Image (tube, rainbow, N blue to C red):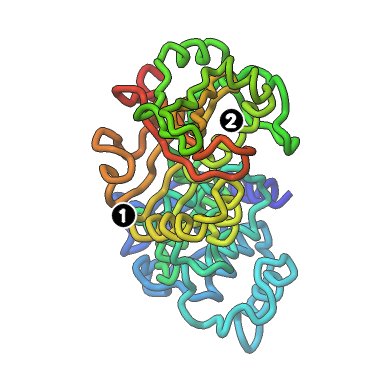
Amino acid sequence: MKKLLVLLSIILTFSGNPTASGTRFEFNDVSDNDWFKENVHTLVNMNVVDGYPDGSFRPGQDINADAFIKMAVTALGYTDIENGSPYWASTYIDKAMELNLVLEDEFSGYGRPVTRYEMARIIVRALEEDYEGNLQEYARLITDYHLIEDIYKDYVVKAYCKGILTGYKDGSFRGERTATRAEAAAIIHRLIDDAARAVPELPGAAPTHKPIPTPAPPENGETVEYLSQEEVERLKQYEDNTGAGLVYDVGTKKMISFYKTNDKFITDRGYNRAVTAVYIATTHMNTANNVDYKIYDKKTYKDELRKSIDPQIFDLYAQDWLDNINNYKIGVEGQFYSHPSLVYVSHEGRLRVRGLIKYIVHSCTDVEHFFGASIPLGKWIQEDCEIELYSMGDLGPYYRKLYTISTVPRDINQGN
């Protein structure tokens, strides 16, 4: 309803002002080449903003909180509000509170410059729009997102993903900064006009994957997505990596091998054991390879890791990985796929789960060390790999090693 009201206001305003060169459009400090000209002129026509008696607009002047609140309220169609007395903005602030754009005691004062954080909060409350379920993908684009106070994070990413409050050239949001009258005009214009927005582009979406139905649930009742039969057959063409060789058995005092093909393993241990091995490997890989240092919650992430790592080494491994995430500014997104027919046992008795991983590295200060010299930032990559689960005991949580078995990572953005 608010947007219809605004659009009607625009139509009526332009109908009453047929000439684009009317005096209301002319400011002595706004030229035809200024990036904000269209924003200013649109809002002037709507009586959202105005100039000063000396004929200036003063685009570079900071905008105060009360003035920005008035702009937001007026842009939503409430154009008949008169100035308050003795404080001119009291009537607009009252209306903003009525509309829940502003809450009691949120501002220490209204007569000081408004911050970008505060503008984002007002804008998101003014929006009557839905949001996609990919807000974290937009949060990854904001280079200082991890520095934003928690109370503002949701407002920032929502205003950002809609293209209303955008970041700086270096990708930062810098929410503590104030805004000029020109910038405020652009923000309010984007609030009411979708066409004026500057929606940021996300990296290429993850390539589509054609799974086959899960043939049997793992023992804990949860399921994971399996590879297509075509991919299973392709991965079966690799030879089994049976390990370094035979193992000395203290009991028999002989060199023996625990090597079991997939068929042998399923015959001896049961199909559901292979299903559970795939579940453990997939759970670990999908947890480890979906994290962003700027936005992840350490406690929640650590709890997820705990599901797939041996408790005896968990604290050491988890802390080491968490330190790496923060120290090397790691942001990665990925998905591991496998199938029970790709599980076998090495000579040493270690379960190996073969599969493929599709991932994209969003950020890392040492890509070569963590992902390989040939891995680019910002591109989806696919690699064939094997996850090694230590011990073939009762398939509890295990530490894992990742072995890349494909010779060259494939850029799976090519041809799209």
In the rendered view of the protein, which quadrant contains the C terminus? Answer: top left
Q: Is residue 340 above or below residue 190?
A: above
Given residues 130 and 102, the one toward you in this image is 130
How would you rate the neighbour count of disc 2 (Cα within 10 Å): few for under 14, some for 14-19, many for 20 or more?
Answer: many
Residue 157, percent from left and from top: 53, 54
Nearer the camera: disc 1 or disc 2: 2
Q: SS class of the residue under badge 1? A: loop
- Residue tagged by mark 2? 278
Q: SS class of the residue under badge 2? A: helix
| Picture residue at 28% right of the left edge, 38% below the top | 372
Residue 334, percent from left and from top: 48, 37
- Residue tagged by mark 1? 170
Residue 77, percent from left and from top: 67, 57
Question: Is any part of residue 330 visible from this angle?
Answer: yes
Question: Is any part of residue 22 visible from this angle?
Answer: no
| Picture residue at 53% right of the left edge, 65% below the top | 119
Answer left or right for 118 relative to 23: right
Q: CA distance from mark 1 to mark 2?
A: 41 Å
Are circles 1 and 2 on residues that touch, CB within 8 Å?
no
Given residues 2 and 358, the one toward you in this image is 358
Image quarter for residue 237?
A: top left
Q: Is residue 268 above or below residue 304?
A: above
Residue 255, percent from left and from top: 41, 28
Q: Amino acid at mark 1?
A: Asp
